[in-house]
Image (cartoon, rainbow, N blue to C red):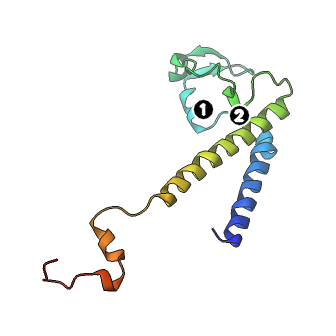
């Protein structure tokens, strides 16, 4: 990769880390479109708990990974909410970057395969068309 490309990747990674580590703490705490549409038909209190009515959100269950270390946009064991959310975002960005970079590295290292490999041979090594070799 050229030096200019590395700079672009580094700046992009830095921006993503800044957004995930700091700006993510200022995201809205109100339900998004899917959450609010699942609550239609129910009465909800100030804490977001369903108090009456009938809606699809009443059948919601906890996810299988709800007890994982990075569940619910935070890190279990970190009591400071701002720090927990920021660290969770930074770890997510770094993990995504590592996996994506690894996949691209593997794909880049893989050489061409198949019958088209003969086209990459030098001219003097090729057989003229229609001759037995």
Q: Nearer the viewer, residue 119 or 15?
A: 119
Residue with the mark numbered 1 = 36
- Number of on-image labels: 2
State the image coordinates of residue 60 (x, y, percent, origin top left): 54, 19
Mark positioned earlier in the residue sequence (1 or 2): 2
Residue with the mark numbered 2 = 30
Q: Residue at x 13, y 82 (%)?
A: 131
Which quadrant, please, contains the N terminus? bottom right
| 65 to 122, vertically: above or below | above
The answer to the question of whether label 1 and label 2 lie on touching residues, with beta carbons closer than 8 A, is yes
**Circle 1 residues within 10 Å: few <14, some 14–19, many ≥20:** few
Label 2 element class: loop
Label 1 element class: helix
Q: Quadrant of residue 44?
A: top right
| 24 to 51, vertically: above or below | below
As measured in the structure, the alpha-carbon distance from the residue carrying label 1 to the one carrying label 2 is 9 Å
**Dot label at residue 18:** none
Q: Residue at x 84, y 34 (%)?
A: 83
| 49 to 12, vertically: above or below | above
Residue found at the far right of this picture: 80
Q: Nearer the viewer, residue 19 or 11?
A: 11
**Circle 2 residues within 10 Å: few <14, some 14–19, many ≥20:** few
Q: Residue at x 79, y 21 (%)?
A: 77
Which quadrant, please, contains the C terminus? bottom left
Q: Is residue 69 left or right of residue 109?
A: right
Q: Is residue 128 left or right of residue 19?
A: left
Q: Is residue 44 left or right of residue 22?
A: left
State the image coordinates of residue 121 (x, y, percent, origin top left): 35, 77
State the image coordinates of residue 120 (x, y, percent, origin top left): 36, 75
């Amino acid at each position: 990769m050229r030096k200019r490309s590395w700079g672009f990747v580094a700046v992009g990674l830095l921006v993503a880390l800044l957004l995930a580590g700091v700006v993510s703490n200022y995201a809205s705490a109100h339900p998004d479109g899917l959450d609010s549409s699942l609550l239609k038909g129910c009465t909800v209190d100030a804490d977001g708990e369903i108090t009456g009515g009938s809606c699809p959100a009443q059948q919601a269950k906890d996810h299988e990974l709800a007890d994982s270390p990075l569940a619910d946009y935070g890190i279990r064991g970190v009591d400071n909410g701002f720090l927990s959310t920021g660290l969770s975002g930074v770890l997510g960005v770094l993990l995504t970057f590592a996996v994506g970079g690894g996949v691209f590295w593997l794909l880049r290292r893989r050489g061409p395969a198949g019958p088209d490999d003969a086209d990459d041979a030098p001219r003097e090594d090729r057989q003229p068309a229609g001759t037995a070799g």
